[in-house]
Image (cartoon, rainbow, N blue to C red):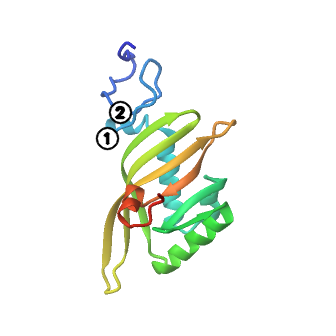
Amino acid sequence: LSPPSTSPQRPAIKPGSYTNAPGCYVNTCLPLNEETRMTAHPLRQIIESCDHAITTKNYDALMEYYAEDAALVVKPGMTVKGKEHIRSAFKAISDYFQGQLIVEQGEMQLIEGGGNALVIMETVLRFPDGQGGTTEMSRRATYVFRQENDGRWLCTIDNSYGTSLLDTGNASR
């Protein structure tokens, strides 16, 4: 393959950044910066919309981005399947964090193939520490999305724990 060409009306996209601009590599996504944010993969915006829905407890909006047969890792050793169970799990998670969970995303890596996308993403969680302060933690989440025939991307696996599940002793053998 030849390197991507640059279009005269757009600034050159740095190698490794995601763009769907003609003549550029399509299935590459590295950490976005201000220069590349305008050409971000649609999944970046979808995940940010999900974060906002979780933070604002808008579960109807959140469920629009999940497939009927989706799975959510609630915590190591506990996975729920199906949109209604996922909705209930998010409500319970919000209650656990006293309705004060804030979710944001950082760096993103994306691999597409066969109508699916694996997203590896830094997830930042902020929640009350129980002593009047706030705790912030960062995870390396893994998400799987499926592109539907109408072009929409739906989450089929939501694992905010990522590969740290291997550290918990709950890994499948």
The residue positioned farthest toward the top in the image shown: 2
Asked if the residue at tag 1 contacts the one at tag 2, i.e. Cβ–Cβ closer than 8 Å, the answer is: yes
State the SS at label 1: loop
- If the image is split into quadrants, where does the N terminus sit? top left
Question: What residue is pinned by disc 1?
Answer: 33
Q: Nearer the viewer, mark 2 or mark 1?
A: 2
Which residue is depicted at the point 32% across and 85% down? 132
Q: Amino acid at mark 1?
A: Asn
Left or right: 17, with 48 as reference point: left
At which x and y percent is residue 163?
Answer: 39, 55
Give the answer, above or below, for where 7 lies relative to 67.
above
Which residue is depicted at the point 32% across and 66% down? 137
Which residue is depicted at the point 66% across and 39% down? 148
At which x and y percent is residue 106?
Answer: 35, 52
Q: Which mark is residue 65?
A: none
Question: What residue is pinned by disc 2?
Answer: 17
Q: Classify 10 Å Cα crowding around label 2: few (below 14), some (14-19), many (20 and above).
A: many
> Which mark sits nearer the N-terminus, 2 or 1?
2
